[in-house]
Amino acid sequence: MDALESGNISEEWKRQLQRYVRGGHGLSERRFSAKRTVLLVIDMQRFFIDPRSHASFPAAEEIIKSIQQLLRGFRSLNLPVIFTRHALLNDEPTGMMGSWWGDVLREGDPFSAIDDRLESWPGERIIRKTRYSAFVGTNLDELLKELDVNRLIITGVMTHLCCESTARDAFMRNHEVIFVIDATATDDEDLHIGSLRAMADGFAILATTREVLDWMSGQR
């Protein structure tokens, strides 16, 4: 079901999550400037989307339209966009993640590519990462300073792993985090909701794609 078309899924999630949202930390309650804001698209790779991949799951496919809409909104305002893709070089050790999952995604594997429907535009950065958090072992920190960014809008997969880990690390680095509940996904709805609860309580402002787009429409 498309949450943007029906509104049923995202509205039900918002209802469940409302008790965890701290006062004043709802997007509709805030007044933002688009200045110093970046859209972060995490690991929207064929590995998680292509049904031929053993790691694919339907919810990853279902959030593509939401992310496409956010990309159009950011690009229309000439705001920065950063993509991440998870892939290890052939000579890189798998580390604890390899031991934990018994599986790694290598650079050069066709499934490591970002889905064609979310192709980056010239000037948009793509960061290769090897851990859950997009801050670990990458130049994301330096890139955000270069862009003079202090607000991250987080989308992608998987909600409770790479998206949440990145959101926590961003918060610890004094960035404001907006976590888009219907533009993030994982392979189990309970894990998705559980992660959103933790984000709402201590790390991020929760928002729907429509709320972010409505906020951005006032920036034109």
Image (tube, rainbow, N blue to C red):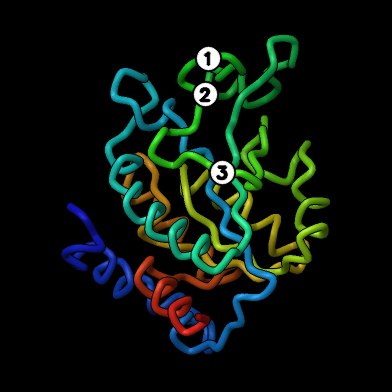
Residue sticking out furthest to the top: 91
Q: Is residue 199 above or below residue 211?
A: above
Which comes before the other along the chain, label 3 or label 1?
A: 1
- Give the residue pinned by disc 1: 109
The numbered dot on residue 112 is 2
Measuring from the top left, give residue 131's x and y in whole percent. Answer: 66, 34
Q: Are marks 2 and 1 in contact (CB under 8 Å)?
A: yes
Which comes before the other along the chain, label 2 or label 3?
A: 2
Of the residues shown, which amino acid type is indicated by label 3? Cys
Q: For this view, does 110 lie left or right of residue 191?
A: right
Q: Is residue 49 above or below residue 111?
A: below
Q: Is residue 91 above or below residue 214?
A: above
Of the residues shown, which amino acid type is indicated by label 1? Asp
Residue at 36% in and 19% down: 54
- Give the residue pinned by disc 3: 162
Measuring from the top left, give residue 169's x and y in whole percent. Answer: 70, 55
